Structure formats: structure tokens, C-alpha cells
Image: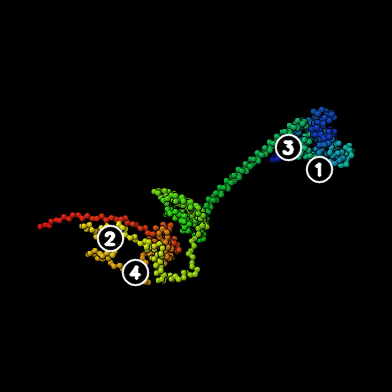
């Protein structure tokens, strides 16, 4: 005994129909009301069958077929006792149970057409006078034995055609059940159920197939409900399988992603030193490119923001973070000036951002740090001094280095033009003696010798003769000459090759930096401290001087001595001491 092969499919099992032998049924065409509904046609067919059948309907397996609009319905019935329990057992779960000839009742035919259907046990003839109506005759004869030969089969065919009537079209076909119990699979779709008999195909709707079914109609409704439930459960089962497969697929994808991530991290860890080297080399190359193609312009940035600086704000330290960021340490004794300065900086179009950090106040002094980010297009190098298109100097000026040029330079520095500020030698000349330190007599001089009558000897003035018994002042030495007939400048005079000095409001003069000059030399030339000179010009790095830069030379701070009042010396009484005898 061979076991059936096990098959598994995700598709629902196809619908199955059980075909019963045609010779077990009697068939009649009964009239129905034209235009009757399927329910009315079913009721009229049942009444007609009950009238012509030799047995009650409860003792028969029966069915009918009615085409919409047809004038007749085809009814068929079989006695129940012809189908014992062993033959009805395969009916359970079948989509339909019907005689074999009923599978051709919906086949497309022409007028006066006879279909000859051969089954394993019989031959049936179906004859249509009108293709839109029910068959006018259905005749069934058992097949002759196999040993009767082909002539007996041809004789049976001719007999069926004579009994069916005049036939203009004759078509022969056969249908063979797939199983021994007479069942076969049918094509079930939403459009209907289709039976195939050779080249012929016959399609029925769900209601038409139920009308052809010979089983009890209540049982058919129950089985249909069970089938819908089974189909729903089958679809739920398939959905669960699909969800499980999807979950397994996602789990596998997550596991694969974790492995890939682990491998990627290992690769990143191994490549991290090389990436760091590449980044460092890239940063160095970028820095070299910036240095080679761009210039750090700290003084230009300072000049931009210095114009808005209040007088109370002093820069104590200026550094650069990059090409366009300036960090300024500053202080002020007026907090409101800091707020005004910040507002003014924010309004400047050259600045991209302004930040104030580390702001502290102590003893009335507010210290803070300014972070100024400049726009790249706003920071430009200072333009070099324009050259004279006609030549190196103006027409009529003496040649540089000549005695005339040196004398003119000294004259322009030492003799101020009418209505201008004093020159450096006059601005920083020591002040005259204070009134309290007057050199006149009268006992008000400091350090004068006290006399017995209250008259003190005061130092003599510049033109007074020296006291008796003391040498006079040395005669004044002649002014030194520099060999050109002009007097040599004093030690604290500005450099000879400097242009004429210009006065600035508030005291002081402007000095234009010349080639070869240093910050310290300029401070010594004007007899000012380097710190005062740097603060007056907001300079953080004295080494960064360039030719043509104008420096403000501040005036020297003059200290006026407080008046000193001489206290007259009171002579003590003189007591004569007797001399020894």
C-alpha cells in the first residue's frame, strides 16, 4: 500500500465537487413564469418536481437549473436509497454534489445543438432548441460493455441523436472524475465556479451552483458557513506565518546589522590613528595655505574697533585667536561706557559677532574680555603711502641728506608756525619754578642761611653776582655745531629725517614712523616712556611698526610743586661767656 504524498501549500485548497452518475436521475424541463427571480424560480421548480416525482421531496436528492429570463427550468431528482452511507461519505466538505451532465448546463451553445457527454458508466445527450432556455431534452444511456466493440458505442450515439431531435450542431466531450469517489477540483474565483469538459467550459455563480446541488439546502447553508469559517482561519494562519517570517527576517537583519556595526567599529578603531594623522596634516596644510595666501592683520582690526572706544576704556592686552578673531583684555572705571561700547560694536558692519566674557568689578574698576569676530571681507591691509607721480619729492624741496634739508628739518621742528601748537622742545620743556620756590630775597627761599636780624641770604638769581668769597658760575659753553654751520639737535629731539610734526587736539603731536626707527628710539627721542606711548596708541606689540604709521606723542606729565613757605629763623639770644682769667 502506497501512502499518499504529503503536500503543503500556502494557498487555500481548491474547491471540490462530487459528480454523481447520470443514469441515477430522472430529468424534466418544467415551465416557470417569465422574468421570475431566482427565488421564485426555485419555488416553482420545487412545486413542479413534487407534482411529477413518484416520491416525496424529503426522500429524494434533487436540484434545478434556471437561466435568468428563461421560460423553462430543468429539474432533476434521484431516490435517496440509491445512495447508501458509504457513497455519501465523500460528500462532506465538497463544494457541490451534482450529476455529471449538470456541469454542462451553462456551456455556450447555438440553436439546435446537441452535446454528447461520455462518463465512465454512461453517455448523456443534452439538446437545446433555444440556447437562452433550458435544454429541451436530457437523455442518458448506459455504455455497452468494453468487449462489445466500437460499433456498439456508435450505435448508442446514433440512437441518442435520433431521440434528441433534429440537431444542426453536435459536439462530443467527456468528463472524468479525478478520484475514485467521483470528485474533481473546480476553478473557484470571485466571478464563479468553472467546470471543464474537454474544450467546453461552464461557469456558475454561487447561487446557481447551490441550486444544482442535490443535498439538503439547510445542510448546504451550514456547510457554506463552515467553509467561510475555515477560509477565515486559513487566512489568519497564513497571516500568522507571514508575521512570524517577517519577525525572523527582522531578527536576522538586526543580528546582521549588529555584526556589521561591530566590524565597522573595529575598522574605525584601527583607522583612528591614521585618520588623526590625516586630520593633523590637513589642518597643517590649511594653516600653511592661510599663511601663504592670507595675512594676520591685528593692527587693522584694532584700528577698526578703536574708533568706537570710549576714553575710559583702556586696552591692557590684545591677542588673536585666528585670522579674523581678536581677543582684547580691557578695563574701565565707568560701567556705562562698557555698555555703550558693546552697543557701538554690535552696530558695526565689519564685525560678525561681539562677546563679553569674564566681566568683573573691583574697587570701582571693571575688567572684561572682548571676543571680536570680524568679517573676512572687512579686514584689509592698510594701503601704502601714495607715491608722488611726478617724482620722489615736491618741486623746489632740497635733496634729502643735504645740509639745506637738515637745516630745514630742524627749523620746522624747533620753530612752530604761527597759530600752531608748540614744538616738542617747547611742549616738554621743564616748567618754570613755582611761586613758592621763587629765587628772590625776602627770606622765602628754601635752604637760605638765617641771620641774626631776620634777613636770610637767598640764592642769587641767574643774573645776580655771586656772594662774597664764592666763585661765580662757569661761563656758558658755546652751542655745539654739527659741522654744517647749524646747531646740533638736542638729545631728546625727534629724528632728523622725520617729517614736520603736527599738533593734535588735547596736547601732543603726531609722529610718522620712518624706515629704521624702533618704538624705543621714538620714545627716547620725545622723552616719553614707552608705556605712555603704547597706551596712547593702543599698541600691544611694539615690534609691529611699519613705515608710514602715525603715532600720537603724548605730552609729558608735568608735576607742579606745592608752594613751600619759608619759616623765618628766630635768632637765639647770645649769652656772653666770661673768659677765663
Relative to the observer, which residue lies in front, 327 or 180?
327
Q: Nearer the viewer, mark 2 or mark 3?
A: 2
Left-right relation of 446 to 110: left
The residue under label 4 is 480
The residue under label 3 is 1
Relative to the observer, which residue lies in front, 514 or 72?
514
- Distance, label 1 to label 3, CA atoms, is 36 Å
Whether pointer 1 and pointer 3 mark residues with C-beta atoms closer than 8 Å, the reply is no
Which sits earlier in the primary sequence, circle 1 or circle 3?
Answer: 3
Query: Pointer 2: residues within 10 angstroms few (<14), some, or many (20+)?
Result: few
462 lies above or below 335: below
Q: Position of residue 579 (x, y in %)?
A: 12, 57
The residue under label 1 is 199
Q: Could you tell me which quadrant the C terminus lies in?
A: bottom left
Which sits earlier in the primary sequence, circle 2 or circle 1?
Answer: 1
Whether pointer 4 and pointer 1 mark residues with C-beta atoms closer than 8 Å, the reply is no
Query: Pointer 1: residues within 10 angstroms few (<14), some, or many (20+)?
Result: few
Q: Position of residue 427 (x, y in %)?
A: 37, 61
Query: Pointer 3: residues within 10 angstroms few (<14), some, or many (20+)?
Result: few
- Distance, label 4 to label 2, CA atoms, is 32 Å
The residue under label 2 is 440
Amino acid at each position: 500500500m502506497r501512502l499518499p504524498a504529503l503536500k503543503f501549500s500556502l494557498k487555500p485548497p481548491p474547491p471540490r465537487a462530487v459528480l454523481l452518475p447520470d443514469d441515477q436521475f430522472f430529468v424534466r424541463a418544467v415551465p416557470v413564469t417569465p422574468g421570475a427571480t431566482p427565488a421564485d424560480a426555485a419555488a416553482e421548480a420545487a412545486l413542479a418536481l413534487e407534482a411529477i416525482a413518484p416520491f416525496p421531496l424529503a426522500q429524494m436528492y434533487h436540484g434545478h437549473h434556471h437561466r435568468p429570463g428563461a421560460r423553462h427550468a430543468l429539474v432533476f431528482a434521484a431516490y435517496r436509497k440509491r445512495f447508501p452511507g458509504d457513497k455519501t461519505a465523500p460528500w462532506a466538505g465538497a463544494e457541490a454534489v451534482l450529476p455529471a451532465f449538470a456541469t454542462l448546463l451553462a456551456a455556450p451553445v447555438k440553436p439546435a445543438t446537441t452535446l454528447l457527454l461520455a462518463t465512465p458508466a454512461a453517455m448523456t445527450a443534452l439538446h437545446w432548441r433555444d440556447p437562452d432556455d433550458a435544454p429541451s431534452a436530457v437523455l442518458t444511456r448506459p455504455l455497452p460493455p468494453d468487449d462489445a466493440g466500437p460499433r456498439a458505442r456508435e450505435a448508442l450515439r446514433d440512437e441518442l441523436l435520433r431521440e434528441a431531435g433534429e440537431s444542426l450542431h453536435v459536439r462530443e466531450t467527456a468528463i472524468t472524475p479525478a478520484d475514485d469517489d467521483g470528485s474533481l477540483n473546480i476553478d473557484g474565483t470571485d466571478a464563479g465556479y468553472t467546470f471543464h469538459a474537454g474544450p467546453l467550459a461552464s461557469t456558475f455563480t454561487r447561487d446557481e451552483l447551490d441550486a444544482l446541488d442535490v443535498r439538503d439546502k439547510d445542510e448546504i447553508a451550514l456547510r457554506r458557513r463552515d467553509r467561510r469559517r475555515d477560509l477565515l482561519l486559513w487566512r489568519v494562519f497564513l497571516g500568522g506565518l507571514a508575521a512570524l517570517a517577517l519577525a525572523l527576517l527582522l531578527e536576522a537583519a538586526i543580528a546582521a546589522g549588529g555584526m556589521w556595526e561591530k566590524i565597522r567599529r573595529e575598522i574605525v578603531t584601527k583607522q583612528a590613528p591614521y585618520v588623526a594623522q590625516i586630520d593633523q596634516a590637513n589642518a597643517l596644510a590649511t594653516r600653511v595655505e592661510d599663511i601663504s595666501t592670507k595675512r594676520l592683520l591685528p593692527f587693522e582690526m584694532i584700528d577698526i574697533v578703536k574708533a568706537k572706544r570710549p576714553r575710559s576704556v583702556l586696552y591692557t592686552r590684545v591677542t588673536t585667536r585666528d585670522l579674523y578673531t581678536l581677543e582684547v583684555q580691557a578695563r574701565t572705571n565707568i560701567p556705562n561706557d562698557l555698555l555703550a561700547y558693546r552697543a557701538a560694536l554690535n552696530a558695526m558692519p565689519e564685525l560678525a559677532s561681539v562677546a563679553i566674557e569674564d566681566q568683573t568689578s573691583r574697587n570701582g574698576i571693571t575688567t572684561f574680555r572682548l571676543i571680536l569676530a570680524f568679517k573676512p571681507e572687512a579686514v584689509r591691509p592698510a594701503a601704502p603711502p601714495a607715491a608722488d607721480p611726478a617724482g620722489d619729492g615736491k618741486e623746489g624741496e632740497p635733496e634729502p641728506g643735504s645740509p639745506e634739508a637738515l637745516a630745514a628739518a630742524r627749523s620746522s621742528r624747533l620753530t612752530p608756525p604761527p597759530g600752531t601748537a608748540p614744538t616738542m622742545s617747547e611742549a616738554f620743556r621743564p616748567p618754570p619754578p613755582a611761586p613758592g620756590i621763587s629765587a628772590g630775597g625776602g627770606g622765602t627761599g628754601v635752604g637760605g642761611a638765617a641771620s641774626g636780624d631776620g634777613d636770610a641770604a637767598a640764592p642769587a638769581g641767574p643774573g645776580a653776582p655771586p656772594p662774597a668769597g664764592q666763585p661765580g658760575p662757569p661761563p656758558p659753553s658755546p652751542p655745539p655745531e654739527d659741522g654744517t654751520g647749524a646747531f646740533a639737535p638736542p638729545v631728546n629731539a625727534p629724528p632728523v629725517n622725520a617729517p614736520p610734526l603736527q599738533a593734535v587736539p588735547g596736547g601732543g603731536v603726531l609722529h610718522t614712523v620712518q624706515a629704521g626707527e624702533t618704538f624705543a628710539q621714538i620714545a627716547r627721542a620725545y622723552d616719553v616712556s614707552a608705556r605712555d606711548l603704547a597706551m596712547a596708541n593702543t599698541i600691544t606689540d611694539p615690534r609691529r611698526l611699519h613705515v608710514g604709521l602715525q603715532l600720537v606723542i603724548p605730552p609729558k606729565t608735568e608735576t607742579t610743586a606745592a608752594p613751600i613757605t619759608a619759616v623765618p629763623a628766630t635768632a637765639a639770644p647770645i649769652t656772653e661767656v666770661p673768659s677765663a682769667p
